[in-house]
Image (cartoon, rainbow, N blue to C red):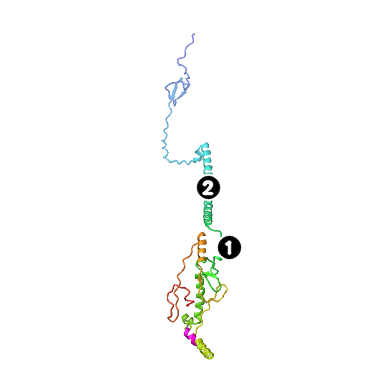
Amino acid sequence: MPATRPSHRSARHTPLGSSSGRSDDEIISLSSDDGLVFKHKPKKTTKKNSKPPANVEIVEISDDEDDTPPAHNDVNSRLQRQIQELKQENSRLKHDCARSAKELSVVRKELQAAEKGKSKAAMDPEMDDLLSCEICTMRVWTPVLIPSCGHTFCKNCLLDWFNQTYTQHLASNPGYNPIRAQATLPRNVEFLLGSISPNDLQRVKQLLAVYAQPAPKFTCPSCRQAVTTRPTEVYQLKKVVHKIAGENGEKEPASAPQPVGRLRRGVGLGRTDDPWAKFFPN
């Protein structure tokens, strides 16, 4: 008897992924009963839509040096070293400039002093002493000579010396009058005195001594010899002093005017061009 084909075809197994147009979610179940194939479509599960995250500002902190390439770091380091070296060199140059300016100032002063020294005439120390006053040790711009001893002094110095003696004498003799103290007897009176007897002459001298006033005793500042006559100005020495002093760049200082001589008790000598009249009226 010929073989018969069963009425039900056996189910053909087809790979799940080979069928086109079939959803990946389909599930095929095979059953031996009646050879039926059931397709189950899985239920779709609905998922809650998740909310997107809120916008958050993100701050990134980065280091410039980390972002700088290594080559740039080497260049910056080299430039920093060069700047530091230039600063040190600048400081050193400023110091050298200040020191040079100070040395230049000293050299200029020395040069000016040397230029002034060229115009000065060389003078022997002994000659310098001869042209200087023994009282003030300065130049004898107006030399005056004391006739009795021959010593020479500045005119102003000798006037001051005599004025000190005169002031001390006035303190000891308040009623001193130089005109009366230096007065002399007329010649006819002297002739009459010569004709009287020695006893009468002695009596007259005693009477004159009562009315006579002691005069100041002026002396030389150097040798202390008595000075009874007026000093004399030495014009030749004055020319020599001014000549040598001018070559050395020295100038005569301005002299203060001499005060007008006056006496006490309203008796005055008046104004005179003779500065010695106060001390030597005659």
User: Which percent across, then down, holds residue 248?
Assistant: 52, 60
Q: Which residues are magenta?
A: 187-192
Residue located at (53% from left, 47% from top): 93
**How far across and down, in percent of the image, does residue 208 sit?**
50, 87
SS of the residue under disc 2: helix
Q: Nearer the viewer, residue 63 or 183?
A: 183
Q: Amino acid at mark 1?
A: Pro
- Marking on residue 125: 1
Relative to 195, residue 126 above or below? above
Q: Is residue 189 magenta?
A: yes
Give the CA distance from mark 2 to mark 1: 49 Å
Please name the residue that numbered disc 2 is placed on.
93
Looking at the image, can residue 211 be seen? no
Q: Amino acid at mark 2?
A: Leu
Return the x and y of residue 197 as percentages of the image width and height.
Answer: 52, 90
* Circle on res. 161: none
Residue 259 picture location, percent across and down: 45, 73
- What residue appears at the point 58 percent right and 64 percent down from the top-left corner? 126
- Name above or below for residue 164 compared with residue 25: below
Could you tell me if the residues under marks 2 and 1 are in contact, i.e. CB atoms within 8 Å?
A: no
Between disc 2 and disc 1, the foreground one is: 1
Assign a secondary structure to mark 1: helix
| Residue 262 or residue 214, whichever sits in front | 214
Q: Is residue 89 visible?
A: yes
Kindly indicate the quadrant of the structure image that contains residue 51: top left
80 or 136: nearer the viewer: 136
Q: Main secondary structure of the magenta part?
A: helix
- Residue 221 sits above or below residue 100 on the image: below
